[in-house]
């Protein structure tokens, strides 16, 4: 699924868990006091990440979180991790090709009412109604939620700046592309950051999976979203 979202990156995923022995000793120390489920999630996404990194020629290293919980990637590489019930995945790329990268996976079902009101902006609710008229079997609110999580994962490691749900407006394309526009004023002071991120989404096997990225200037990397985006 990840490979279909972002061919420019390397991805690996699994619908089960790797054994805890797949963790490197330094990784096992990080989650030594965690419950069994958390240890399995932590170890399996890193197992996926190392598999993806190897395909790009990166060294095998322990992937430890920094003080903010962001994975520390080998020099010259970036990546993102995600897990939900029944799914673990990782995407990695060379840092000169993609500046920021985020992925997220969620069950493909409707958001609870209270969460939906918190996540969606007014224009996103209107877009969701329009999309539902075209594709009524899709839970568009969940796709938007997943997209905002992916945007945050791409954004935060570069800026160390919090983004709330209301700070991002998602426009989805029925062809699987998306654009994420940041609320004015959310750019970190002194940083040359884009106001718009690109991405792709897909639904399959009962899951929503989204990738979002920040491309270096002049890279030409963009989403498939275009005139068919709902705005």
Image (spheres, helix red, strand yellow):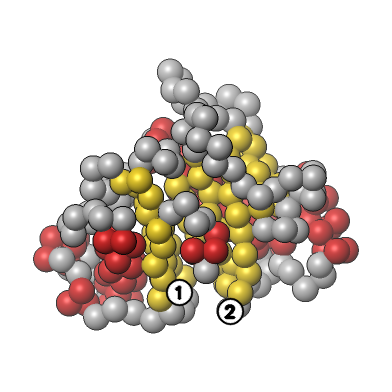
Depth check: 15 or 122 in front? 15
**In the rendered view, does 110 fall on the left or right side of 86?**
right
Q: Which residue is mark 2?
A: 205
Are discs 2 and 1 less than 8 Å apart at CB?
yes
- Dot 2 falls on a residue whose secondary structure is loop
Q: Which residue is mark 1?
A: 87
Q: Where is residue 156, by image quadrant?
A: top left
Q: Is residue 60 above or below residue 195?
A: below
Q: Is residue 122 above or below residue 40?
A: above
Q: Is residue 189 above or below residue 100?
A: above
Please indicate, yes or no, whether residue 101 appears anywhere in the rendered image: yes
The image shows residue 50 at horizontal and vertical percentages of 27, 63
**In the rendered view, does 42 fall on the left or right side of 149?**
left
Please indicate, yes or no, whether residue 162 appears anywhere in the rendered image: no
- Identify the image quadrant of the C terminus: top right
Residue at image point 28% right, 42% down: 76
Residue at image point 52% right, 30% down: 218
Number of numbered discs: 2
- Dot 1 falls on a residue whose secondary structure is strand
Crowding around mark 1 (Cα neighbors within 10 Å: few <14, some 14 to 19, many 20+) is: many
**In the rendered view, does 51 fall on the left or right side of 209?**
left
Residue at image point 42% right, 41% down: 97
Q: Residue furthest top?
A: 190
Depth check: 19 or 29 in front? 19
Crowding around mark 2 (Cα neighbors within 10 Å: few <14, some 14 to 19, many 20+) is: few
Q: Where is residue 99, by image quadrant?
A: top left
The image shows residue 154 at horizontal and vertical percentages of 46, 45
**In the rendered view, does 101 fall on the left or right side of 123?**
left
Residue at image point 59% right, 43% down: 222
**If you read the primary sequence from the N terminus, does the residue marked by circle 2 or circle 1 appear first?**
1
The image shows residue 77 at horizontal and vertical percentages of 31, 46
Tell me the distance, in whole angstroms, between the alpha carbons under discs 2 and 1: 10 Å
């Amino acid at each position: 699924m990840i490979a279909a979202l972002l061919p420019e990156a390397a991805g690996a995923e699994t619908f089960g868990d790797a054994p805890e022995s797949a963790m490197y000793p330094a990784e096992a120390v990080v989650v030594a006091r965690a419950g069994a489920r958390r240890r399995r999630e932590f170890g399996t996404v890193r197992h996926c990440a190392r598999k993806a990194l190897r395909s790009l020629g990166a060294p095998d290293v322990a992937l430890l979180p920094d003080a903010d919980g962001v994975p520390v990637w080998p020099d010259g590489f970036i990546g993102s991790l995600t897990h939900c019930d029944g799914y673990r995945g990782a995407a990695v790329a060379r840092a000169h090709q993609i500046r920021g990268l985020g992925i997220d996976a969620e069950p493909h079902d409707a958001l609870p009412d209270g969460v939906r009101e918190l996540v969606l902006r007014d224009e996103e609710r209107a877009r969701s109604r329009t999309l539902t008229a075209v594709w009524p079997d899709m839970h568009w609110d969940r796709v938007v939620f997943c997209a905002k999580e992916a945007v945050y994962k791409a954004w935060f490691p570069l800026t160390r700046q919090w983004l709330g749900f209301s700070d991002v407006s998602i426009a989805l394309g029925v062809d699987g592309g998306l654009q994420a526009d940041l609320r004015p004023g959310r750019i970190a002071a002194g940083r040359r950051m884009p106001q718009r991120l690109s991405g792709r989404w897909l639904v399959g096997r009962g899951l929503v999976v989204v990738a979002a990225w920040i491309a270096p200037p002049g890279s030409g990397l963009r989403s498939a979203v275009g005139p068919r985006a709902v705005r």
